[in-house]
Image (spheres, rainbow, N blue to C red):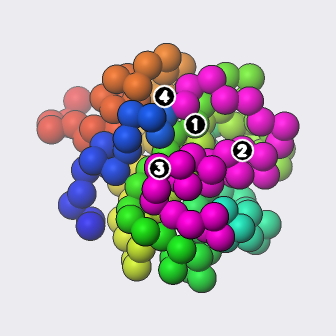
């Protein structure tokens, strides 16, 4: 799992670049619904994502949040997957502006590896900005592909 490419967990129809959310919980629910639509999780996983958000904000900085379920929700995961939702108008995330949510579903301890890989990419201010401004699935795939060499 730790070596799985992020892009291998992301279906093209799991990239939604023109989403609109009324608040962070709406955004989390939309991420959960996209994971359900991808066949990665059962509906109950969405509740686990909301529980996680109620406990601790999934905002990670640079306009990005990474909603995922609680440990108890992992039994609702059918397969590891990612979804990327971009909110061009932004979402108030407990006082922080978020324009990109990367929803995660991972069985077992896989979410730790995914979070680590995502953080490495998304906490790069340039890449995070490019993701916030992405207008095509191809751009998202490119940004989530690790660099082969250091720039």
First in residue order: circle 1 vs circle 2: 2
Is 85 or 150 nearer to us in this picture?
85
Residue 22, image x, y percentages? 84, 37
Helix, strand or loop under label 3: loop
The residues colored magenta run 16-45
Number of the front mark, 4 or 3: 3
Residue 146, image x, y percentages? 25, 41
Helix, strand or loop under label 2: helix
Magenta span includes 34: yes
CA gap, disc 4 and disc 1 = 10 Å
First in residue order: circle 4 vs circle 3: 3
Q: Is residue 3 above or below residue 55?
A: above
| Tag 1 and tag 2, C-beta contact below 8 Å | yes
First in residue order: circle 4 vs circle 1: 1
Number of the front mark, 3 or 2: 3
Q: Is residue 38 left or right of residue 92?
A: left
Q: Which residue is mark 1?
A: 85
Q: Residue 57, located in which quarter of the rendered image?
A: bottom right
First in residue order: circle 4 vs circle 2: 2
Is 23 or 127 nearer to us in this picture?
23
Q: Is residue 92 left or right of residue 48?
A: right
First in residue order: circle 3 vs circle 2: 2
Q: Which residue is mark 3?
A: 38
CA gap, disc 3 and disc 2 = 17 Å
Is 13 or 60 nearer to us in this picture?
13
| Tag 1 and tag 3, C-beta contact below 8 Å | no
Q: Which residue is mark 4?
A: 131
CA gap, disc 1 and disc 2 = 8 Å
């Amino acid at each position: 799992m730790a070596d799985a490419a992020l892009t291998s967990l992301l279906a093209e129809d799991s990239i939604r670049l023109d989403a609109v959310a009324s608040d962070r919980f709406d955004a989390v629910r939309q991420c959960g619904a996209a994971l359900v639509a991808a066949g990665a999780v059962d509906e109950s996983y969405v509740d686990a994502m909301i529980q996680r958000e109620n406990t601790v904000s999934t905002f990670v900085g640079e306009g990005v949040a990474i909603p995922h379920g609680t440990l108890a929700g992992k039994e609702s995961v059918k397969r590891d997957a990612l979804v990327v939702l971009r909110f061009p108008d932004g979402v108030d995330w407990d006082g922080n502006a978020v324009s990109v949510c990367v929803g995660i579903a991972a069985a077992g301890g896989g979410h730790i590896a995914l979070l680590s890989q995502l953080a490495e990419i998304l906490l790069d201010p340039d890449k995070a900005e490019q993701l916030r401004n992405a207008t095509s699935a191809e751009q998202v795939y490119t940004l989530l592909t690790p660099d082969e060499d250091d720039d």
